[in-house]
Image: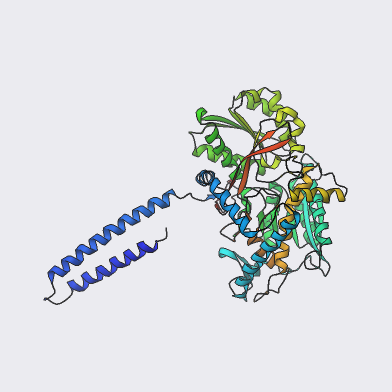
Amino acid sequence: MQLSKNRLLRLLALLFAFSLVAAACGGDDGDDDAGETQTTEAMAEEEEMAEEEMAEEEEMASDEPEEEAGGLSQDVIEQAAEEDEMAEEEMAEDEEMMEFDRSTIEGIFEEAEFRRAKVVERVSAHIESGEWGVGDDNILRGPEGFVIDLNECPDDWSNTEGITDTEIRLGQTGPQSGTLALYGNARLGWQTYLLHVNAEGGIAGRDVVMKSYDDAYVAAQTIEFVDELIENDNVFAIHTLGSPNTLAVYDTLNAECIPQPFVWTGHPAWGDPEVHPWTTGSILSYSTESVLWGNWIKENLADQLPVVVAGLVMDNDFGLAYELGFEEYAHNNPDVVSEFIKVRHDPASPTITNEITTIAAGNPDVYISMTAGNACLLAVQEVAASGLKEELSAAFTPSVCKAPASWIAPAGDDGDGWYIVGGGVKDTTDPALIGSDAFIDFIIESLEANDLDPTISMFGNGYMLGYPYVEALRIAAELPASANNPAGLNRANFILAVRAIDIHHPIFLDGITFAMNGNADAFPIEGTDISQYDSSNHSWIVSNVIDVNGASGNCVWDKDNGGCR
């Protein structure tokens, strides 16, 4: 704990008093004994006051919420909920000060330009002072101790790979077939957004193009296609989807010094700026989501505590991240969760009937889907069909299955009343937003103009992924030269822009920050909505928005033992 200014001054005063006593004790025989006694008494008073102040500061420090590795802690979340009203007032004041009209697409893009300029100004000042950028030692430095030693990159590594006079080539791999094929539609939405960007002049006069592969959510395929993107397609940066898929390649991409920002997975492992500096996430950490489930139970089922909670867990790295997160919450909060029943399912299985039957036999009070894709919809249907829904106090579907048209609306009334910690993402098919949200309307118009069906939510998720990517590319393109790095767009400047990004992301709810700050803040999103599904209008009704930007602790993922360290 750092010393406060007042406490430091008092301790210095004590040291000075001690020196006076020492001088008195070692002085001439004629020194005044009374003076010595007075000095000693004064010293004792100062010491007592300093000790009291130290105790007060230690008590205050103990009250401060601690960071949780890979996500937000229970204390931070509870404090955020208490301060939510104050945060809304501050947000309103900030918006008024900035004078940007988010009710129009012109206002949204004007704000984006303003925020980019602020980031460029900040980063440029640090580069020009010699603090950031690539130094003479070929080490890239950035915010809050962020460091990449470019000397460790492969001998044939190129800082400008994938950049030509006319193009910036990006690579992407994700499911276009299999049980999670619907998520693959996001690439089409992203490419549609790039058509708009390119029509407006691209990035520094270059078109942004994307080469995509179908890995069918099979990690072995992801490895194969990432090798193809590196060795034959010569891309500038690579985007991956899915926790097991990203875990399978992030060691390779970091060793190859290839940017892998804004991956579409909330695994806490992406909060690792020191060991995996080239990789970042783009959505709410699953660890944080798990704690928020527990916090909702604590606040809303207070008269039933402790409760039995059952989770349907996808049996892979993705589902296990959820399982570990909630298991830790349950262990730390026995007064909230008396038992956690976890039932795993095969990601490739077309049915989950047996798993839901097993869960129902445990008579849980709360059910949580810790899965993705078709299993989310099947869970809503099977929980109702088994009679379990009538017995539950609450049922949750995960943030990755927020799209109503895909994962809950087909279940009809069976989906009514389900809860979600939604990650703050707006759904482009939400009737409550269509016609009232400028960016949602912009997406719909763009999709229709390119013959894509705007009622498919995953097209909208492509804009969620593509928007910060483009903003980071634009920031990097404006950065000045550093000692051993040219000005403009290159991999070093791009990852520096990513790690310093601070934007308003228009597909996230107002009040949710999209920002990172080097080693101090490795998660771009640390906010979410808490919502409940209304089957009558096919919408998620938001009851609360929480944002605690910068409060998550970093996570070096331990593959062998599972968990952050």
Depicted 27 relative to depicted 418: above or below:
below
Q: In which quarter of the image is residue 361?
A: top right
Residue 46: x percent and y percent?
Answer: 27, 61
Q: In which quarter of the image is residue 97?
A: bottom right
Q: Nearer the viewer, residue 498 or 508?
A: 508
Q: Is residue 175 left or right of residue 542?
A: right
Q: Is residue 485 left or right of residue 13?
A: right
Depicted 549 relative to depicted 141: above or below:
above
Protein image colouring: rainbow
Residue 376 in view, yes or no: yes
* Quarter occupied by the N terminus: bottom left
At x 60%, y 66%, the residue is 142
Residue 122: x percent and y percent?
Answer: 62, 68
Residue 259 in view, yes or no: no
Residue 264: x percent and y percent?
Answer: 71, 49
The furthest residue to the right: 451
At x 60%, y 56%, the residue is 94
How many numbered marks have been drawn onto this rendered protein structure?
A: 0
Residue 399: x percent and y percent?
Answer: 67, 41
Depicted 162 relative to depicted 450: above or below:
below
At x 74%, y 45%, the residue is 436
Q: Which of 328 and 35 is in front in this view?
A: 35
Depicted 389 relative to depicted 167: above or below:
above
